[in-house]
Image: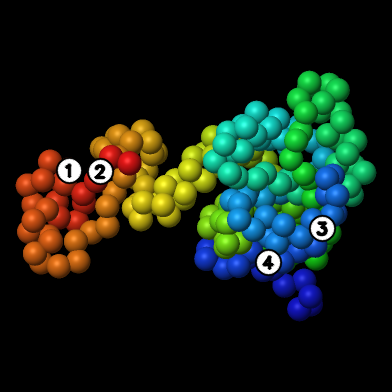
Amino acid sequence: MEENKLNMPLLGDDFPEISVQTTHGPMNIPGDLKGSWFVLFSHPADFTPVCTTEFVGFQKLYNEFEKIGCKLIGMSVDQVFSHIKWVQWIKETLKVEIKFPVIAANDAIALKLGMLHPGKGTNTVRAVFIGDPQGKVRLVIYYPQEIGRNMDEILRAVKALQLADNKKVAVPANWPNNDLIGDHVIIPPAKTVQDAEARKGSKDCFDWWFCHKAQ
């Protein structure tokens, strides 16, 4: 029973080490991805409509992820030959070439990543893991099988994480189109009384604890 315990990587954890077979050959994750941001996303099954739309959606943004130094990796518990045939079908039928690798996982790997939820059947749920260049888990989202993901949001999340790391700032809701501050970012709150007083009245501060600036 202990072997089937559901694990869920937490934010800030090291991404669990897994050795896998993919459509691009064997990989060690996150070892082979060190130095790069990555998005690893699972899908319930090959040759299913929602998953097909997701793969096409990720591929449409493939170059955008590449521009920001982020690798895409798909995953399900289907065998690698199934992945190969499905990717071929997408290319031949939908005229979209899938350029990212697709992992052929097993139940042990899926459980290790918290992708098998007993209440949602035996297929993997739609998990999204964003990892940073140090192999740390920075964002986790689980979608149910019946709802496809928004790839623009996942791309936005990677860009936001990179910006937050590089500039030591926070990123507002709906960035870069926030209703209050547009594409500005939020600076850390004041840590001293003097700093708080100095911020009062600034055109870029709503109050001493809520100040923003251009990127």
Residue on which disc 3 sits? 20
Q: Residue at x 58, y 62 (%)?
A: 134
Pointer 4 local density, CA inside 10 Å: few below 14, some 14–19, many at least 20: some
**Amino acid tagged 4:** Pro
Residue on which disc 1 sits? 204
Secondary structure under the numbered disc 3 in the rendered image: strand
Tag 1 near tag 2, CB within 8 Å:
yes
Q: Residue at x 67, y 50 (%)?
A: 40
Q: Is 158 left, or right, of 9 in this rendering? A: left
Q: Residue at x 84, y 54 (%)?
A: 26
As measured in the structure, the alpha-carbon distance from the residue carrying label 4 to the one carrying label 2 is 36 Å
Residue on which disc 4 sits? 16
Pointer 1 local density, CA inside 10 Å: few below 14, some 14–19, many at least 20: some
In the depicted structure, whether residue 147 falls above or below residue 140: above
As measured in the structure, the alpha-carbon distance from the residue carrying label 1 to the one carrying label 3 is 49 Å
As measured in the structure, the alpha-carbon distance from the residue carrying label 1 to the one carrying label 4 is 41 Å
Residue on which disc 2 sits? 213
Secondary structure under the numbered disc 4 in the rendered image: loop
Pointer 2 local density, CA inside 10 Å: few below 14, some 14–19, many at least 20: some
Question: Which quarter of the picture shows residue 84?
Answer: top right
**Amino acid tagged 3:** Val
Q: Position of residue 135 (x, y in %)?
A: 61, 61
Secondary structure under the numbered disc 1 in the rendered image: loop
Which circle's residue, 1 or 3, is located before the other in the chain?
A: 3
Pointer 3 local density, CA inside 10 Å: few below 14, some 14–19, many at least 20: some
Discs 4/2, front: 2
Instruction: Name, please, the residue furthest toward the front.
Output: 35
Tag 4 near tag 2, CB within 8 Å:
no
As measured in the structure, the alpha-carbon distance from the residue carrying label 3 to the one carrying label 2 is 43 Å
As measured in the structure, the alpha-carbon distance from the residue carrying label 4 to the one carrying label 3 is 12 Å
**Amino acid tagged 2:** Lys
